[in-house]
Image (cartoon, rainbow, N blue to C red):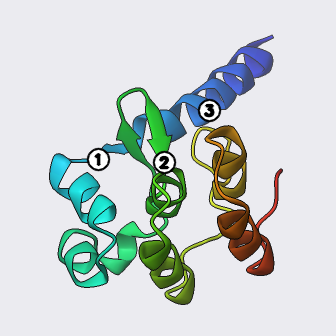
């Protein structure tokens, strides 16, 4: 019985840990993505940030997912060319699933699919 409780507790901690590990996306970071300017983006995001989840309100996005949602093609191309994980899940959604949910353009969906993006 003790093992079951311990296992359940650890599993719950792992699930909730991914939500608590997300940092808040600052206004400066959002503006950098909205600018669709790579130089501005690089001032706000270190390469180590490219595969992190950031909270925007109550929803977590990777920089790629947020760029997809915002239809920022220059940033999308930059991130994909600089080893951003095309299938990074934040809140259990890949950037391609974000594109589906936010009525992303077919062009963006094609770019993600060509780079190995999937919906799982």
Report which residue position mark 2 lands on.
61
Question: In the image, is residue 27 above or below residue 33?
Answer: above
Q: Secondary structure at mark 2?
A: strand
Between the residue at mark 3 and the residue at mark 2, the CA separation in whole angstroms equals 17 Å
In the image shown, does 115 or 21 lie closer to the viewer?
Answer: 115
Can you tell which mark lies on residue 15?
Answer: 3
Q: Position of residue 53 (x, y in %)?
A: 45, 51
Between the residue at mark 2 and the residue at mark 1, the CA separation in whole angstroms equals 9 Å
For label 2, count other residues whose C-alpha is less than 10 Å away and answer few (under 14), some (14-19) or many (20+): many
Quarter assignment of residue 14: top right
Which residue is depicted at the point 50% across and 59% down?
A: 71
Q: Are marks 2 and 1 in contact (CB under 8 Å)?
A: yes
For label 1, count other residues whose C-alpha is less than 10 Å away and answer few (under 14), some (14-19) or many (20+): some
**Figure disc tally:** 3
Q: Are marks 3 and 1 in contact (CB under 8 Å)?
A: no
Question: Would residue 116 be found to the left or right of residue 46 on screen?
Answer: right
Question: In the image, is residue 68 above or below residue 44?
Answer: above
Question: Would residue 13 be found to the left or right of residue 100 on screen?
Answer: left
Report which residue position mark 1 lands on.
25
Between the residue at mark 3 and the residue at mark 1, the CA separation in whole angstroms equals 21 Å
Q: Which mark is in front, 3 or 1? A: 1
Q: Which mark is in front, 3 or 2? A: 2
Question: In the image, is residue 59 above or below residue 54?
Answer: above
In the image shown, does 109 or 51 lie closer to the viewer?
Answer: 109
Mark 3 or mark 2: whose residue is earlier in sequence: 3
């Amino acid at each position: 019985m003790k093992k079951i409780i311990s296992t359940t507790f650890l599993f719950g901690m792992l699930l909730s840990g991914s939500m608590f590990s997300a940092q808040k996306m600052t206004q400066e970071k959002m503006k950098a993505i909205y600018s669709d300017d790579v130089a501005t983006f690089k001032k706000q995001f270190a390469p180590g940030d490219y595969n992190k989840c950031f909270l925007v309100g109550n929803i977590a996005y990777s920089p790629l997912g947020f760029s997809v949602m915002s239809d920022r093609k220059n940033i999308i191309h930059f991130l994909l060319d600089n080893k951003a994980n095309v299938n990074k899940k934040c809140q259990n959604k890949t950037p391609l699933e974000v594109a589906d949910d936010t009525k992303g353009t077919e062009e963006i969906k094609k770019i993600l699919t060509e780079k190995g993006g999937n919906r799982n």
